[in-house]
Image (spheres, rainbow, N blue to C red):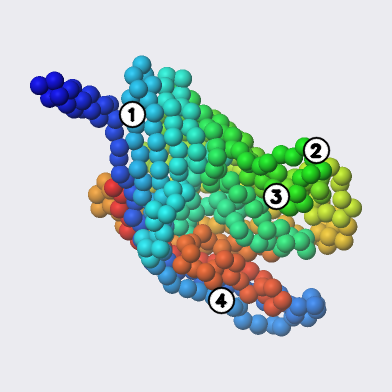
Amino acid sequence: MKKSLVSLAALAAAGVASAQSSMTLFGVVDTALTYIQTTSSFVGVPGAPGLNFIGAPDRHQSQWAMTNSAHYASRLGFRGTEDLGGGVAVAFWLEAAISNDDGAVGLAAFDRRSTVSLLGGLGEVRLGRDYTPTFWNDSVFDPFGTNGVGASQVYLMNSGPRTVSFGGVNRGLFGNPNYVRASNSIGYFLPPNLGGFYGQVMYAFSEAIKYDPGTTTPAVANNQRTGGYVGGRFGYAYGPLDVSASYGESTSGDNYYQGITTKVDIANLGASYDFGVVKLFGEISRTQNKNDYVVPPIIGTGDFKGDGFLLGATVPIGVGLIRVAWSHVKLNYTSPPTGVAAIVSATAQDPSADKFAVGYVYNLSQRTALYATAAYVKEKNGAAFIMPVSNNFPLFTNNYFTTGSGYKADHVMGYDFGIHHAF
């Protein structure tokens, strides 16, 4: 009899515990047919800038492929909470990217998000791999949400890897390992009951081994500070208005024996306002690549920056949504190169690119939609930006007829036609 009572008590306790806990399986399956075409124009014979051919034809490269994540990023995840009482709860979130077009990527890694949190009246403390504060403005205030061929040039400038010849130096853009997400991070989020004010701060560990004395540090690059991140985002959202500013610094490289640390700083300001018949979006952004030297070099590549702008709108039409956006980025120096590169860069024009995108989403239900997007990028002064696409486009990492050919990147066009389902 006692054993039965004990068993019933255990079952009752388990029932209470389960009532205070929850777990959800969720995901998105997004598949599209995508077409990309680049165009390169002839500017002269390599090694002989004054020699040109009248009527030299443009060169094109194009490709059709089935892709994923052109509207919403495909994913599979698990999230849950447990009520600890007294207004305190613990939560977890495990989210993996999936490539549903070929099935090659699945639950092997929860690289989209992997966090555990403690929540209460004072806010949330979150540990693990998570989105950086500086990425959110690029995504939230982009009508295309940094997905598919319509994603803004600001996102493309920061996401890399892309190569841009700037002043005779291959800039490689910003090489930021923590642009979208940061691993090994501690984040704090303000509570949601602050009258529309919201915010977060994040610190991510580089997890480097420190050596004492410093001369015992191994002569290996990127082993002391690379991977670290610190940043924050604060905003106000009430009614139709949402406005937010963010700043973050990521360490992208270091060399102890050369006395150099390379950092990528991002600052942006975004806003949206929903008039009902149309919702307007805007963003301004600056990304800076900075080299901190113990002893400044005689010959150096200099520091540079990228300025970005976005204007966009969404217009609801029945069960559908029209999306439009213009975005612009421009690169230039904040401190010029030294040595031979300084002579070349003195007359170099700043690379820039403009992007125009338009799309339509037709909602079949609250969880399923058909969509189509078209985008056009105009390149200037050596910029060679490619639209963000999945790994199905191995040729389109930086695919223009340029190097050593007498051609320069001129423009790129892209199209997505797809369906997504959320569960």
Q: Is residue 258 above or below residue 402?
A: above
What residue does disc 4 label?
60
User: Residue 82 has which mark?
Assistant: 1
Q: Amino acid at mark 2?
A: Pro
Crowd class of label 2 (few under 14; some 14 to 19; many from 20; radius 10 Å): few
Q: Amino acid at mark 3?
A: Asn
Crowd class of label 1 (few under 14; some 14 to 19; many from 20; radius 10 Å): some
What residue does disc 3 label?
222
Q: Amino acid at mark 4?
A: His
Q: Please give left or right for residue 157 compared with residue 344 in the image.
A: left
User: Residue 156 has which mark?
Assistant: none
> Which sits earlier in the primary sequence, circle 2 or circle 4?
4
Residue 157: give x, y in percent of width and height: 60, 53
Asked whether the residues under the numbered discs 3 and 1 touch, taking CB atoms below 8 Å apart as contact, a structural biologist would say: no
**Residue 146 appears in the picture as rendered:** yes
Asked whether the residues under the numbered discs 2 and 4 touch, taking CB atoms below 8 Å apart as contact, a structural biologist would say: no
> Which sits earlier in the primary sequence, circle 2 or circle 1?
1
Q: Using the numbered discs, state the Cα–Cα distance from disc 3 to disc 2 in whole angstroms.
A: 18 Å
> Which sits earlier in the primary sequence, circle 3 or circle 2?
2
**Residue farthest top in this picture:** 86
